[in-house]
Image: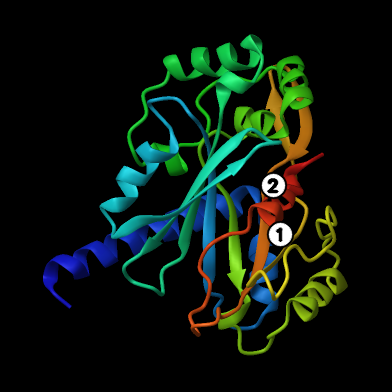
Amino acid sequence: MGEGKKNIMNSIEVLLNEMWKDYISYTPSAEKISKLFGEQVTNDHIAFRTLNLDQCNIFKQADYLKEFGYKVSGDYHFEQKKLNAIHLENTEERLPKIFLSELILEDFSHELKNCFVNLLSKVELNAKDLFIGGRSWELDYDLYTKLAKESEYASWLYVWGFCPNHFTVSINHLTKFHDITDVNAMVKANGFTLNSSGGEIKGTKEELLEQSSIMADKIKVRFGSINETVPSCYYEFAKRYSDSSGKIFQGFVTTSADKIFESTNK
């Protein structure tokens, strides 16, 4: 490996570790579950949420990730949730895929759109902030509940800002578990609740991807003078299958991802 590539790999490893530490600080269940496997867990993908504004959209995020050897490898649209998304893969295949989604603000009320336009107009964001910058504004609980009525995704972004939404266990890389049903059973046996929207397992072997996830942790957050408990983030599990050519599927299935998004529902 050349010196330049080695430096890039070192940099992305540092960034991925920062992302994980940030994520488990408000998703303690993920760290607990990762230890239950009793082995080193490989991340299938890491997901982030954002808005389709110039300063923070998915393509702005993707430009930053390209510095670390990532390239856009798929794009998706979620009509019901009013989202666009892309996923990126690294030239180094052992590194996790990155799934980036954005809220299409013009598809919502003026109040929701203006809320985020105003919030982001007061924030200076560098490229790295779009992944682990968090939230830099004060919260109002009434506004949070109004946003939640229009879009759970929007209300989540309002509270948490820019941070990893979930990490994902690659079942393909586990040595003690090979089936998503067994992973789910172990997770439930240890007291965690799975997202059952559309069934505990989203997707099928025929679709080349099976996914499941826990429901998001509940974290106490300060809203002005009051504390309220709201969903933070969740941990996902993915099993991938080979296509007719023998290549393991690396993309995503929108109908499954649509239900996975609901892991942060109240």
The answer to whether residue 19 shows anywhere in this view is yes
Q: Would you say 241 lies left or right of 200 here?
A: left
Q: Which mark is residue 261?
A: 2
> Is the residue 222 above or below the residue 6 in the image?
above
Where 125 falls versus 13 (above or below)? above
What number of labels is visible?
A: 2
Would residue 226 be found to the left or right of residue 106 on screen? right
How busy is the neighbourhood of tag 1: few (under 14 within 10 Å), some, or many (20 plus)? some
* Residue neighbourhood size for the residue with mark 2, other residues' Cα within 10 Å, grouped as few (<14), some (14–19), many (≥20): some
Q: Which residue in the structure is indicated by mark 1?
A: 29
Q: Quadrant of residue 105?
A: top right
The answer to which quarter of the image holds residue 155 is: top right
Residue type of the residue flagged with mark 1: Ser
Q: Quadrant of the N terminus?
A: bottom left
Q: Is residue 44 above or below residue 141?
A: below
- Residue 72: image location, x then y, percent: 38, 53
Please, what secondary structure does the residue beneath circle 1 have? helix
Q: What residue sits 75% from the left and 26% below the top?
A: 148
User: Which quarter of the rendering shows the C terminus?
Assistant: top right
> Where's residue 71, x and y in %?
34, 56
Residue 122 visible in the displayed image: no
Q: Which residue is farthest front?
A: 244
